[in-house]
Amino acid sequence: MEKWNHTSNDFILLGLLPPNQTGILLLCLIILIFFLASVGNLAMIHLIHVDPHLHTPMYFLLSQLSLMDLMYISTTVPKMTYNFLSGQKGISFLGCGVQSFFFLTMACSEGLLLTSMAYDRYVAICHPLHYPSRMSRRVCANMIGGSWTLGSINSLAHTVYALHISYCRSRAIDHFFCDVPAMLLLACMDTWVYEYVVFVSTSFFLLFPFLGITASYGRVLVAVYHMRSKEGRKKAFTTISTHLTVVIFYYAPFVYTYLRPRNLRSPSEDKILAVFYTILTPMLNPIIYSLRNKEVLGAMTRVFAIFSFLRE
């Protein structure tokens, strides 16, 4: 092992699953989740693309969320599955950089996109008369483009830094993907300055958006409470609860993981928490948005004949 560490620039991913029957069962479950997430998010993207009733800012944002979730889970699960089945835990230096870049891009971009979705609901419910101007196609496109651009720039900066660190210890990353904080533990240099940068970056892309979303939905809840129409109030509450469910599932484990000091973190706990935002959330999002949304269910009956048959 020591010879391998000193003669190769590659890394070793210690993985998530134990190499036994329990690990095989858990891998089968993860593969099933991956399949459901892929089908669900592709179906959501297709629905929003082909059904004119869903050509609104909210659903354009939702289609981007589905695209991000699809790329999110595809960044980690295929490599983890291959490593487990082949018995090889290695990942190339370049491969680790590519995986880290796409993971961080999706993480940061999705955080900003969820903020845009919260703003969309805030304007729709609290300022409905201004909705066409405040959430025009151009504004929506700028929100989407800004989420992808800022996420990519932030990701590129972190990835480049992580790949230029001097690693003088074992190159075995105690994770199932190339997570930058897990890689920092292998560095032979003091990284406290960079860890502070990670804290600031996490606050900007995750904590502050989460606080903004919370404040936005707080205003929305007050407006909904004072609605005279019971049907409108019920529809608004359904929409808000759907968004809040997605936000909590995504932000809570992420913020808890990346804002804790190093001495309070453990690799095993970090890996379990990572399962929520890298594997479970991409599967749950299309389910949550479809089962609790009459417009999406209606589009499914119009586009997919099988759903029309089942509803009859």
Image (spheres, helix red, strand yellow):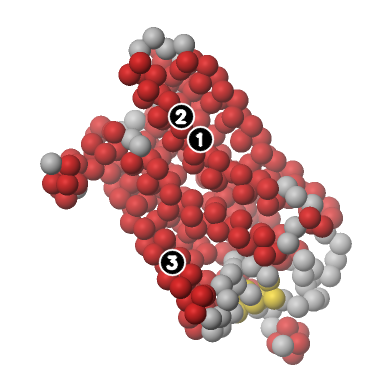
Q: Position of residue 24 (x, y in %)?
A: 47, 76
Confirm whether residue 161 shows in the render.
no
- Foreground: disc 2 or disc 3: 3
Q: Which residue is mark 2?
A: 240
Q: Position of residue 225 (x, y in %)?
A: 47, 15
Tell me the element at label 2.
helix
> In terms of depth relative to the viewer, which is nearer, 56 or 146?
56
Confirm whether residue 284 shows in the render.
yes
What amino acid is found at the position of numbered circle 3 in the picture?
Leu
297 left or right of 22 in image = left
Seen at 57% across and 50% down, the residue is 107
What amino acid is found at the position of numbered circle 2 in the picture?
Ile
Q: Are marks 2 and 1 in contact (CB under 8 Å)?
A: yes
The local crowd at label 3, few if under 14, some if 14 to 19, many if 20 or more residues have their Cα within 10 Å, is few
Q: Which residue is mark 3?
A: 29
Seen at 60% across and 79% down, the residue is 90
Q: Position of residue 198 (x, y in %)?
A: 73, 50
